[in-house]
Amino acid sequence: MDYVIAPPPMISLPVVGEDATFPIHRIYCVGRNYAAHAVEMGHDPDKEPPFFFQKNPDNLALDGNFPYPSMSNDVHHEIEVAVALGQGGTNISVDSALDHVYGYGLALDMTRRDLQGEMKKLGRPWEIGKAFEMSCPCTPLVKASEIGHPESGAIWLEVNGERRQSGDLNQMIWKVPEMIAYLSELFTLRPGDLILSGTPSGVAAVQRGDKLVGHAEGIGDLQCTVI
Ligand code: MN
C-alpha cells in the first residue's frame, strides 16, 4: 500500500517479559468510577450508568515525563488502572469479559481541569480537557496470564513524597468486567483497546518539577516528572 503522506507510526506499549510490544487501537476512559471521587467532583455517587470519553493513542507518554500543556493553569493528576484488551467484540457478557483482557498497566489521566470545567458548564465535549498531547503517561503492561485479574488492593499516588490520592481497587463502582460489557454494547471493542478505569479521590493540581509516583497493588508502579 502506498500512501500520499507518510502514515503515522503505530503506538504501542512495552510488555513486561516480552520483546514484542502491545499495539494500541483506542483509549477509552470511564468517568467518576470511585464514589469518593464522584463526591469530590460534586456528584452523587449512587450507581448510575457508567459514562466514557476517549483519549488518543498518541496521547500516551512513555518516557517518564509529562510536559505541562498549553492553555491551562489547573492541570490535575488522576491515577488509574489501565485494562488492555487482547480480544475484542460486541455485546460481551460480564461473565466472559475478563477472558478478553490481555493485561494491566498503571496510567495517569492528566486533565486540564479548568478547560474541562468550562466545557461541562457549556454542555460541550471534554476533548480539550482530556485528550491533549502527552495527557496519558502509562507504564509497561503486565500480563493477566502472570498476575491474574486484581479486584482489590491499594491504589495510590504521591506527589513529591506526599500521599495525594488513595483508594482500593475494590472501590470501583463499575467493576472491570461490567465496564467491558457496557462498552461493548456501545462500541466494537478491538484487540489493542485500552480502558482507563477511573480514579480514586484526591485529585489535585500539578506544577512543573513535581515528581509523581503511583502504585497499584498487584500491577506495579508508575513514575512521572512534570516538565
Ligand atoms: Mn479519569
Image (spheres, rainbow, N blue to C red):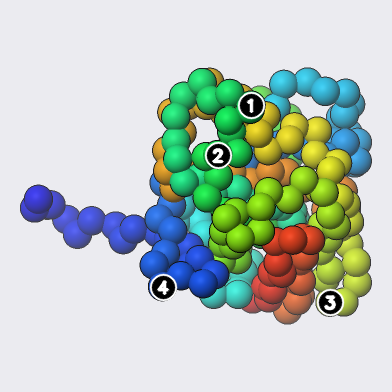
Q: In the rendered structure, which disc, 1 or 2, sits on the residue that comes first in sequence?
A: 1
Q: Does residue 75 appear in this view?
A: no
Could you tell me how far apart the alpha carbons at marks 2 and 4 are, in whole angstroms? 23 Å
Contact flag, marks 1 and 2 (Cβ < 8 Å)? no
Residue tagged 3: 160
Name the residue located 57 percent from the left edge and 55 percent from the top edge. 145
Name the residue located 90 percent from the left edge and 66 percent from the top edge. 163
Secondary structure type for disc 4: loop
Mark 4 or 3: in front is 4
Q: Amino acid at mark 1?
A: Val
Could you tell me how far apart the alpha carbons at marks 1 and 2 are, in whole angstroms? 10 Å
Q: Quadrant of residue 64?
A: bottom right
- Residue 1 is left or right of residue 205, and the answer is left
Query: CB at mark 1 closer than 8 A to ligand 1?
Result: no
Q: Amino acid at mark 3?
A: Asn
Q: In the rendered structure, which disc, 2 or 4, sits on the residue that comes first in sequence?
A: 4
Could you tell me how far apart the alpha carbons at marks 1 and 3 are, in whole angstroms? 39 Å
Label annotation for residue 94: 1
Could you tell me how far apart the alpha carbons at marks 4 and 1 are, in whole angstroms? 32 Å
Q: In the rendered structure, which disc, 4 or 3, sits on the residue that comes first in sequence?
A: 4
Could you tell me how far apart the alpha carbons at marks 4 and 3 are, in whole angstroms? 32 Å
